[in-house]
Image (tube, rainbow, N blue to C red):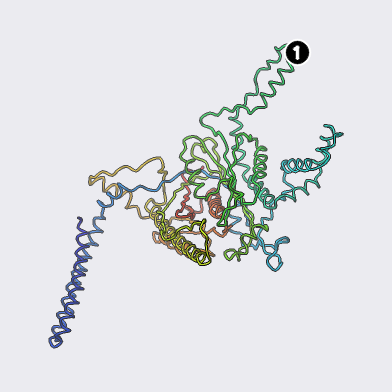
Amino acid sequence: MSATKIMSYSRYILVMLLVVYLILVWMYFKDNALQLTSSNLLLWFVVVPLMLLGSIMAIRWMQKKMENKTGNIPDIAVEQENTKLPNSYRLFMYSSVCLPEGDSWSEVIDNDADLTLLSEDLTDFDGLPILIKPITKLADAASLPYEYMHDVYLENSLENSDFLEDSDFDDDSLNQAFDNETFDEESHTRRVTDLNSITLRLCSLIHEQLSLSDEILSSIAEHFNSHYQPDSQGPNSAINIHPEWQQHYLISADNENNDEPTTTFPDASLSKLPIYLCIPDGADSSLLIVAIKEQLATYGISESLISITPIITNDTDAADDNANNHEIYDPINFINEHVMPLSQSASPELCLLIIVDSQINDAWLESQLHSSNTSNVIPTEAGVLLVFCNQAAQDVLDIDTNASFLLTEICTPNVKDEDVKNSDPKDSISKKSMAENNDVNANSNFNNSLTNKRSYLNNLTVIKNLLIDNSLSLAPTNKTELQATKKTTAVITDTASKYFTTKVLPSDISITVLSDINPLNQPYDMSLLMNFIDAFIAHGALVNERHLGHYMPLSTWLKPFISLSLLINLASEGQQESDSIFLITQHKQCSMLWLADYDQTP
């Protein structure tokens, strides 16, 4: 047992003796009041208690002095053997963002103009037009250069027409009809307007996002074109074939050439371009996928190299049955399943995440706007495109616009509420039982809210200690483990000084702290984060904070990734503004730390 623990126990014993002594003395003189003279009062109620209290304070002072002198190094070293730093994952990222305020950090942050408009189509309960906040610079969907808008609805119109049943139509007449339908701009515009309004708006958002990412898409296309080697220069063996068999041979060869060409990739090259398309429930994912492939084809990226996975988002409590064929999960699941494994891969890998959402439609108004949580929310729209690369992919592509970040996941243990149980849907529920279930659900939501707040507080504490202990400089730890501490005095001293005596930040260091907190409806989280920032200010740092959660606050996907996209934009363009930049995003039971790694940024 260490000396500090012995002193702690001694203090506790003396405190208990003091309390028992005062009780016994008071009981004695209560029954013998005549003996309570002034001298006895001074002796038993003042002198003796002060002696005991002085002993307690002296032991406390000695304990403090010993702790300051020794620093409790042996105990720290023993704990360090069983403790590991959180895993950090190095990523190279590129992003583009499309908001009503603009598409860059400076445009979005410095834009204080009123961007709301009165809608011509959407009304409230009283039939009055409501305020909306659209992206005014988006191109109209009817003007987009997408062939599928012609082909899909041309096919539908021809299938529903009666002229296909007319036997007098020959191939030339049919082709002429297709040509007439294809170049009829008025008919094309009319068909486009018949499309789902959500799908049309998302199509415009996707087109804008891909256009803003022209530089990195061109680099990826150039890489694929330099490594994509179809076998298209084979010898023309038909020359040596008998003339009567040449036509048959050419037809067979042509059929073989129409098959998917063989692709040969060296080890140090990208093998595919995985794309994750995050869209709201109700949009037509098939048409949006076709539009993406068509626009990427203009860069020379073959459709065989692209894999697009739709992710259907639903910000309501119950998921729609129409989305059962798609992946439905939270951003934290996407990061754990795709982003973190990507960073650990030794071969070049990247993935592209496109998130688009528009609230300016009747469907969103019916499901969200008239609820109590969204009564003061103005419908808006936004889009984000993110490219995640590992170190090997960055070395292959050598993209200057990519910024390097260290991703660290901070999680607290899950808290299970055993008192809340799910009711059996097969049982008949009376009005009384329904009321009881509502109370249970309310209590469950309240408990979850408290749990999330406690988790956020604990996560911020871990992040604060992690950054201060390491002087705002982390390193990837996912592939290496900390060395076990030896039990010699010299090694213990070195270990303690390495991990626990660097809690002093460089003087006058400039830090930019970003968060995905919405200050309007998250006051408690704001107070926690301000206490977090005060800890850095106490160490002499100059802290500039920005809270970005008010952009699309109701979207569980856009809220954190808009903040991440703006962080990437700031780190790429404004590296001289701050010595360190990092973002903290909130998730269920977890928080993500995105720390800019200037040493690795191209």
**Residue 57 in the image: above or below residue 516:** below
Q: Quadrant of the N terminus?
A: bottom left
Please give the name of the residue rendered at 65% of the width and 63% of the height, measured from the top-left corner: 114
- Find residue 363 and report its horizontal and vertical position in percent: 66, 57
Amino acid type assigned to the residue bearing label 1 in the image: Glu
In front: 436, or 126?
436
| Residue at 67% over, 57% down | 361
Element under label 1? Answer: helix
Residue highlighted by disc 1: 244
Mark 1 Cα-neighbour bin, 10 Å: few <14, some 14–19, many ≥20: few
Depth check: give the residue in front, 209 or 434: 434
Viewer can see residue 321: yes
Task: Tell me: residue 403, above or below residue 314.
Answer: above
Horizontal placement of 146 versus 318: left or right? right
Residue 160, position in %: x, y?
78, 43
- Using residue 50 as the reference point, say whether residue 124 is left or right of it: right
